[in-house]
Structure formats: structure tokens, C-alpha cells
Image (cartoon, rainbow, N blue to C red):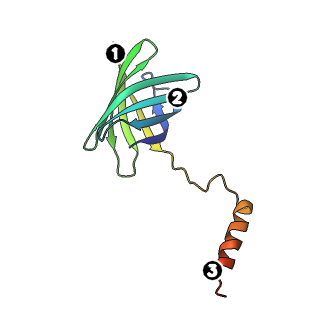
Amino acid sequence: MPGKYSVEGKNLDGSAYSETAEIIATSETTCRIRWQTGSTTSKGICMRNGNAFAAGYVMGDSIGLVVYKMMDDGALDGIWTIADQEGVGEEVLTPIKLSILAPLSAQRLKPLFGWLEHAARPG
């Protein structure tokens, strides 16, 4: 559950949006969450119960609630609303998988593999 996520969703009016989110664990079942869309940041607290995941958040002067279902692949499939507004939005948070080798190009790794090959030879 903790980590960085890409977010795809639909606003209350049906328009689409894309953003990122980050979840930081504060205990085994509780966390903090932050969504970033361009220069707009929303922050909240969150909680997990089985495969249910919910967050209350503040976005500017508005207070919102989002409820997700945790999927087998690690994605969070959710619906959300904002206090005193009609309608429900939708969003899916998909984990961003980072490879520790991603910043390393094949050219940079070549000397390492050459050294390993040499070190593995008997003699």
C-alpha cells in the first residue's frame, strides 16, 4: 500500500484528469496520502480494513472522502465525493514500479558485468 501511484480519474462533471499520489504508512493500518495535479496538492489521512481503503482529504477549502477497493495487482479502484456537492467522481491509483537499475544504462552496467565475469573465472 505505501508508495507512489499514477492516478486516472473522472471529476464530478465527468471530465477526465491525471495526477500522481503518494501514500506514506503511519502504522499497519493507517497512513497519510497526498495527491498532486499540476500545482494543486490535496492531503489527507487514510486507513485500510481488509481490502477496503478510505481517505478523508482537504482540497483548498473543500473536504472530501474517497473509498477504494484494493485490487489483486496493487491498484486502488475508488469513488470520491466533496462535501456539499452533488455527484461522485471515480479514480484508479496504479502503483508506480521503480527499478533500482532504471537510471543505469546498459553502457554503465557493461564494466560491472565484465568484472563479475572475470571474478567468476577459476584461476
Count neighbours of disc 3 (C-alpha within 10 A) and say few if under 14, some if 14 to 19, many if 20 or more.
few
Q: Position of residue 44 (x, y in %)?
A: 39, 25
Q: Where in the figure is residue 20, as x and y percent of width and height?
A: 51, 34
Q: Nearer the viewer, mark 1 or mark 2?
A: 2
Q: Amino acid at mark 1?
A: Ala
CB of mark 3 within 8 Å of CB of mark 2? no
Mark 3 or mark 2: name the one nearer the start of the chain: 2
Tag 1 residue: 83
Assign a secondary structure to mark 1.
loop
The residue located at (45%, 21%) in the rendering is: 13
Left of 67 or right of it: where is 37? right
Q: Please identify the quadrant where the N terminus is shown.
A: top left
Q: Which mark is residue 120?
A: 3
Q: Residue furthest left?
A: 50
Could you tell which of marks 3 and 1 lies nearer the N-terminus?
A: 1
Packing grade of label 1 (10 A; few <14, some 14-19, many >=20) is few
User: Which residue shows up at 46% across the image and 29% down it?
Assistant: 34
Q: Quadrant of the C terminus?
A: bottom right
Which residue type carries mark 3? Ala
Disc 3, SS: helix
Residue nearer the viewer, 86 or 31 = 31
Residue 100 pos. (x, y %): 57, 54
Residues at marks 1 and 2, CA–CA distance in whole angstroms: 20 Å
Kindly identify which residue carries mark 2: 36
Q: Residue 23 at x, y = what percent?
A: 42, 36
Q: Amino acid at mark 2?
A: Gln
Residue located at (64% from left, 87% from top):
122
State the separation of the CA atoms marked 3 and 2: 47 Å
Residue at 42%, 34% in the rendered image: 91
